[in-house]
Amino acid sequence: MHLQTTDIEQMDRIRRLNIINSVTGIKPANLVGTRSPDGNSNLAIFSSVVHLGSNPPLLGMVLRPRTEVRRHTFENIEQLGVYTLNHVPVTHVAPAHQTSAKYPREISEFEAVGFTEEYIEGFEAPFVQESHLKLGLQLEEVIPIATNDTLLVIGRILHIIAPDGAFDDEGHLDLGQLGSAGISGLNSYYSLQKEAQFLYARVGSFRDY
């Protein structure tokens, strides 16, 4: 199969959506926890989280256009200034996927799908108790992407909550052992398995492998 730009542009919308969302491979599955200023919690699944830098510790997340429908997640992040990212456990992919449904603002996805809100002192956004790795972030910057009217939301990591021993002495994390899920496309979920770990790559070191 060889698809060119014209083929992609002319294909059925759903087929195009599924293809383009799948070609990047396995993406991280994260539940984004937010709360509105009046106390309504919100939970939504995202697969667009990317690492932007470690000093300061920044993560980016792409949100779809605001013009389509009201985006409760972004509105809450923008208004409260903090949010959480929670790895989706492979044991909870069904309720995690259900958070993508368009619930009314007054309905909390936590309650609707059976996840438990968890809070830590001094941080207003809700974590997912069932998640094995949780991040608390502070909104740093929002960059509009003019090409498709999406937004790159940049957050600084303030909190990392994980089981004891989740990271080794050098800070490596085994996502398979942790039980985190990955996403391909919009609705296919994968368990992860660590296949290898290498030293920092240097010219001439490849023969050591």
Image: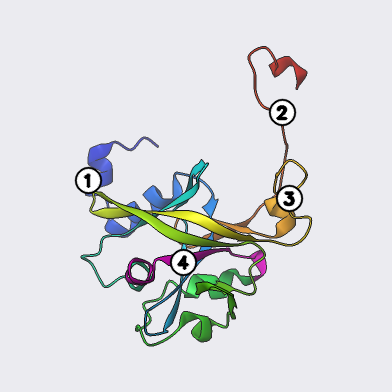
Tag 1 residue: 147
The answer to whether the residues at label 3 and label 4 have Cβ atoms under 8 Å apart is no
For this rendering, which residue is in front, 38 or 52?
A: 38
Which badge, 4 or 1, comes first in the chain's sequence? Answer: 4
Q: Is residue 90 magenta?
A: yes
Crowding around mark 2 (Cα neighbors within 10 Å: few <14, some 14 to 19, many 20+) is few
Q: Are marks 4 and 2 in contact (CB under 8 Å)?
A: no
For marks 3 and 4, the one nearer the N-term is 4
Query: What mark, if any, has residue 199 been given in the picture?
Result: 2
What colouring method underlies this structural image? rainbow
Q: Which mark is residue 167?
A: 3
Sooner in the amino-acid sequence: mark 4 or mark 2: 4
Looking at the rendered structure, the secondary structure element under dot 3 is loop
Measured as percent of width and height from the top left, residue 181 is found at 61, 59
Residue ID for mark 4: 83
In x, y percent, where is residue 75?
Answer: 32, 70
* 93 sits left or right of 16 in the view: right
Q: Which residues are magenta?
A: 75-91
The residues bearing labels 1 and 2 have C-alpha atoms spaced at a distance of 38 Å
